Image: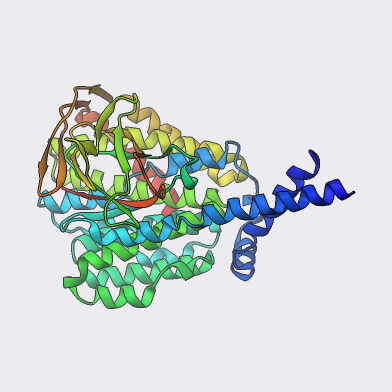
């Protein structure tokens, strides 16, 4: 019985700290606050929550149908002033990489994608030396 | 200990899940037709993944406006029909349709018509007990001034996104799927009707590329069709539309993209292409079937 009680105590502490550490990432608020970062002329489409669960998740992925003739913009936000190591990459439906925000030796907080080929694209967020593994992003479009 | 662990984890997860407001949830559940209470046949995660791919109907309205075509009120679903929609099946589908119509009126800055659509949306959303997600007061104020177009589009998009998210988290993905289906079908209908008077390559290709969305819509409906005979019938109707889209060929050619930095933004040059082989006959058939399916929904 004592063993069960002590095990339950350890388990409770484990659950408390695990949920507490996940609770630190308010990706919903960050993605909402990211909306004004869309450049003028772009219409808001969606916001994306990027919760790397304290580093235990290596990528967060969404998908969207991009259309030929439309320009899309993705902005990344974090609690810090920069992207906090969050990288966005676009892959086409065959999983071939179209682009990444990790380019020219730096991490861009915004990418503009004038689409020339209609199809399903995967919007993948990964972490490069991120401190909090937590952020948000917004997708907008314009013709 | 091994037996206790999963039970404890389950209790903790259940406790966390109970943070939603019970009254809202209860009111929502009670509002649904009893036939819609079944669970979908594929995982909700997969459904959610497919749903998030469906593009905003606003994209088509923006294309139509920017290509110089005039506003055409008579092709939209009349707001006089609102009172006909008594089942949650019809209410969800037509909420999606009116949502697209509202976006169309907003893009063309037809504020008075927009207010009529807003009233219909309020009526249907209230009937589905999801009216709390629309900030009608703010939307009405924004709609009163055409200077507020960006804010108006933003808030209506956010409200619809919140509804879709809420319905999915409440295990009512079937209503969310109907909402998306209605919204997409109305955008297709508007495109086809405008094409009749203003045929052009860009709009023809835009209609043709809906083949990709059509496949996703049908996947979603097939996933929940056993929950409601109405959804099963709709799936069968849309299968006919899909067979018309199947005649269209989309050829994708991949070529590595290049990029440049402009004002701190990474601007991609997409070197891949798609060739969309779609004929006048294809568009004519798609228009006919779309009209037929839509007529059943809005009548």
Q: Is residue B182 above or below residue B256?
A: below
Image coordinates of residue B275 in percent, x first then y, are 19, 25
Picture quadrant where residue B156 is located? bottom left
How many numbered discs sit on the rendered protein? 0
Residue A30 percent location from the top left of the image: 37, 58
Relative image position of residue B289 (x, y in whole percent): 36, 38
What residue occupies the far right of the structure in this picture?
A: A1
Q: Which image quadrant is residue B231 in?
A: top right
Residue A48, visible in the rendered structure: no
Seen from the viewer's position, the closer of residues A73 and B169 is A73
Foreground of the two, B42 or B270: B270
| In this view, A113 is above or below B274 | below
Which residue is at 19% across, 36% downward?
A105
Q: Is residue B207 left or right of residue B88?
A: left
* Whether residue A13 is visible: yes
Indicate the colouring scheme.
rainbow
* Residue occupying the point 17% across, 28% down: B257
The answer to whether B287 appears left or right of B241 in the picture is: left
Q: Is residue B280 left or right of residue A59?
A: left
The residue drawn where x is 61% and y is 40% is B226
What x and y, as percent, mark residue A86? 33, 44
Above or below for A143 versus A116: below
- The structure residue drawn at horizontal position 74% and vertical position 43%, both measured from the top left corner, is B6
Q: Toward the viewer: A78 or A66?
A: A78
């Amino acid at each position: 019985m004592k063993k069960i009680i002590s095990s339950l105590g350890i388990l409770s502490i484990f659950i408390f700290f695990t949920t507490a550490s996940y609770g630190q990432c308010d990706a919903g608020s960050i993605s909402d606050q990211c909306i004004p970062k869309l450049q003028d002329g772009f219409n808001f489409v969606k916001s994306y929550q990027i919760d790397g669960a304290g580093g235990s998740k290596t990528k967060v992925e969404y998908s969207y149908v991009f259309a030929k003739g439309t320009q899309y913009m993705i902005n990344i936000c974090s609690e810090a002033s920069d992207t906090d190591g969050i990288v966005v990459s676009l892959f086409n439906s065959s999983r071939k990489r179209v682009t990444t925000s990790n380019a020219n030796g730096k991490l861009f907080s915004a990418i503009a994608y004038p689409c020339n080929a209609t199809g399903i694209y995967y919007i993948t967020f990964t972490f490069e030396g991120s401190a909090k593994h937590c952020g948000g992003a917004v997708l907008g479009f314009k013709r | 200990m091994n037996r206790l662990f999963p039970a404890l984890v389950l209790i903790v997860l259940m406790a966390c899940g109970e943070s939603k407001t019970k009254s809202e949830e209860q009111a929502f559940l009670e509002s649904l037709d009893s036939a819609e209470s079944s669970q979908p046949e594929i995982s909700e995660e997969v459904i959610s993944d497919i749903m998030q791919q469906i593009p905003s109907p606003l994209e088509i309205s923006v294309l139509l406006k920017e290509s110089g075509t005039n506003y055409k009120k008579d092709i939209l679903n009349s707001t006089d029909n609102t009172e006909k929609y008594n089942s949650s099946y019809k209410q969800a589908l037509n909420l999606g349709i009116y949502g697209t119509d509202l976006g169309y009126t907003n893009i063309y800055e037809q504020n008075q018509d927009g207010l009529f659509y807003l009233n219909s949306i309020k009526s249907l959303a209230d009937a589905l007990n999801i009216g709390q997600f629309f900030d009608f007061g703010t939307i009405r104020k924004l709609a009163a001034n055409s200077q507020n177009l960006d804010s108006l589009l933003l808030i209506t998009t956010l409200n619809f996104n919140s509804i879709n998210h809420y319905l999915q988290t409440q295990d009512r993905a079937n209503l969310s799927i109907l909402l998306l289906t209605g919204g997409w079908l109305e955008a297709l209908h508007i495109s086809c009707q405008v094409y009749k008077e203003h045929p052009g390559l860009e709009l023809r290709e835009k209609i043709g590329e809906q083949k990709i969305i059509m496949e996703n819509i049908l996947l979603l409906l097939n996933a929940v069709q056993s929950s409601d005979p109405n959804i099963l019938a709709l799936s069968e109707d849309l299968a006919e539309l899909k067979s018309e889209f199947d005649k269209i060929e989309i050829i994708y050619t991949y070529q590595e993209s290049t990029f440049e930095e402009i004002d701190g933004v990474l601007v991609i040059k997409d070197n891949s292409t798609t060739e969309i082989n779609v004929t006048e006959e294809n568009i004519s058939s798609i228009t006919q079937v779309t009209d037929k399916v839509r007529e059943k929904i809005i009548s």
